[in-house]
Amino acid sequence: VNVRAIGDFLFTATIVVVIAVALWASLTWPYEARLLPWIIGVPTIVLCLLTLALVARRIWSLEPEEQVQLLDIQADRDLPGTIVAIRATAMFGWVLGFFGAIWLVGFLPSVPLFIFLYLVVQGREKWWVALVVSVAMSAFMIGVFHFVLRVAWLRGQFPELQRLMLDWINRLF
Amino acid sequence: MVEAAISAFENLFACPCHFGVIPDTFFFLFVGVVAGLALGAIPGLGGVVGMAMLLPFTFDMQPQAAIAMLVGLTAVTTTSDTIPSVLFSVPGSTGSQSTILDGHPMAKKGEAGRAFGAAYTASLIGGLFGAFLLALSIPVLRPLVLIFGSPEFFMLGLLGIAMVAVLSGGAPLKGLIAGALGLGIGMIGADPQIGWPRWAGDTLYLWGGLSLVPITLGLFAIPEVIDLAIKGTRISDVPRQAMTGVMAGIRDTFRHWLLVLRCSALGAWIGCIPGLGATVVDWFAYGHALQSEKGARDTFGKGDVRGVIAPESANNAKEGGSLIPTVAFGVPGSAPMALLLAAFIIHGIQPGPDLLTRDLDVTYTMIWSLALANVIGAGICLAFTNQLAKVAMVRIHLLAPLVITFVFMAAFQASANIGDLVTLLVFAAVGWLMKQFGWPRPPLLLGLVLSHVIETYLFISLRLYGMEWLMRPGVLIIAVLIVLSVYYGYRRSKAVA
């Protein structure tokens, strides 16, 4: 079977479910609010089902699949699908981990921590290279976003921690 | 009129001077340009943030100097926003979304320098063209823009959606679905008619609708970083010697001068339509180049320099266009123009007829500032192009955490809510899956940016004109353009398949 086509099938099926749930949720809305969602949603479900049927045909196709030309940056297909899936899961893990750290302790402590850990564990850089890069990048971010742009920093679940860090940085400069 | 133009030019270089030598107005114009370049290169920021930051500093300045600084800032953000688009597939601003499609593949092929050379030169010409058009068209365009009502704006929105057919390449069905999904996502939040919260539940963040910035960054930036990390190489695998090519890019732009002028005219015209310009102008130009350029159907999306030239010339020309309704009617053509309007009022300048008669020198200060800012901005960018292009040679594992950090910070600036980061993550996953399974992402973005325009103007048209709006000449002309656009898109998809 064509593993990539199975993935495409599941992705398309998810879209069908999402649109169906969205339309179902809009049943109780006033006419003005639900008109355009239905004008767009109903034909889109039909198009999705058509796509689903076309993708399903590809799942058991024995012919090698040709990459369709898109006006978009296209995925490289040099690596086997399983390796891509494993590495992508790891990368999404890092991204989610960074988000989790931001949610927990805020932006300021998370930035150097994420950069350092990523470089050491995933990038296999020497610890001192990781330290220099993470400190330099954090200093740049603080300079641009805190001192120049004066933008808000997400504070996380322990706002005191970030406030103490910002106080320390403000005293330093 | 000529005297006013000459007088405004002289005023730009007249004393009082900084340090005794640098003319005051020109100095502040330069400050605006440098700030604009820096902000344009940082994803998620740009003209609006820059204007908001600099506006308070203008309170004590002379009106001409203040306007020159603000116009200088907004003129060049669309020049430097090419940098993250080409290098990291991260759009620096909404005006450089489509630059990614060919700019980033060029960087991957080791042609980042060429892409930058072409982009900056196209930006320069586009910006100058926009300023020139502004100078010429203020008296002429006033009645023309007034002809446009809500039915025509609605039809222009539909024309944008018709571009989906062009932007879908060999997957028209998936492209249509992606475009429709974009329209649907754009409808999340309070609806424009009665304020009913659609698909927002009790989440306050969703009531205002999803922001474009985290969605764009999620769709394009994170998936690209993830894919590069999966490969574990550099952005470009070609030798360092191949990273030059700035001159080749400049030559490319002049070789395709007709495309530059066409897209500049398109950009200036779309820019002067309030509420439509900033987010779609690059897609319109890209779609136009795709339809009209020879062999584009085979090479666009794979690193064709014309795919960089078209949006870059249009998004700089747009600034001149968006100044037209701001100056002539006091109707801001884009978000930065709304802040410029605030600056007008702070400095006692009344937009409208006064700016075309009594305060004509202020109008010409804007035009000269726009032209000079584009020259200075493109000059600075070109001077540093080779250094920038070398970033593509850095190992991806060194770059990935830096880009991810920047993307998170940029996404959070949309509304300073953790919801922005959740949106970023959701669309990062959607964008990566779309890329893997051959779903075109540009139609989704186009649907999203046009959703509000289409819905608002459709309901206004129906309320004001019933069904009679369908017979308006402007509506019929745009309808013909839509049919032609869909037809060419269909022909193209057949040819690709």
Image (tube, coloured by chain):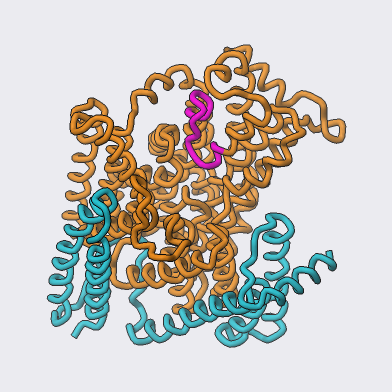
Chain colours: A cyan, B orange
Residue at 34%, 58% in the rendered image? B198
Is B462 drawn above or below residue B239 in the view shown?
above
Residue at 40%, 40% in the rendered image? B276
Q: Residue furthest right?
A: B20
Residue B403 image point, x, y percent: 56, 68
Residue A23 image point, x, y percent: 23, 63
Which sits in the foreground, A57 or B343?
B343
Q: Is residue A127 left or right of residue B408?
A: right
For the image shown, how many numbered marks are present on the structure?
Answer: 0
Residue B264 image point, x, y percent: 43, 35
The answer to whether any part of residue B18 appears in the image is: yes
Location of residue A89 by image quarter: bottom left
Magenta span of residues? B325-338
Report the predominant secondary structure element of the magenta stretch.
helix
Is B474 drawn above or below residue B299 in the view shown?
above
Residue B220 image point, x, y percent: 43, 63
Is B142 drawn above or below residue B303 in the view shown?
above
User: Which quadrant holds the C terminus of chain B?
Assistant: bottom left
Q: Is residue B337 magenta?
A: yes
Which sits in the foreground, B9 or B387?
B9
Q: Is residue A29 magenta?
A: no
Q: Is residue A146 left or right of residue B1?
A: right
The answer to whether any part of residue B129 appears in the image is: no
Which sits in the foreground, B166 or B120?
B166
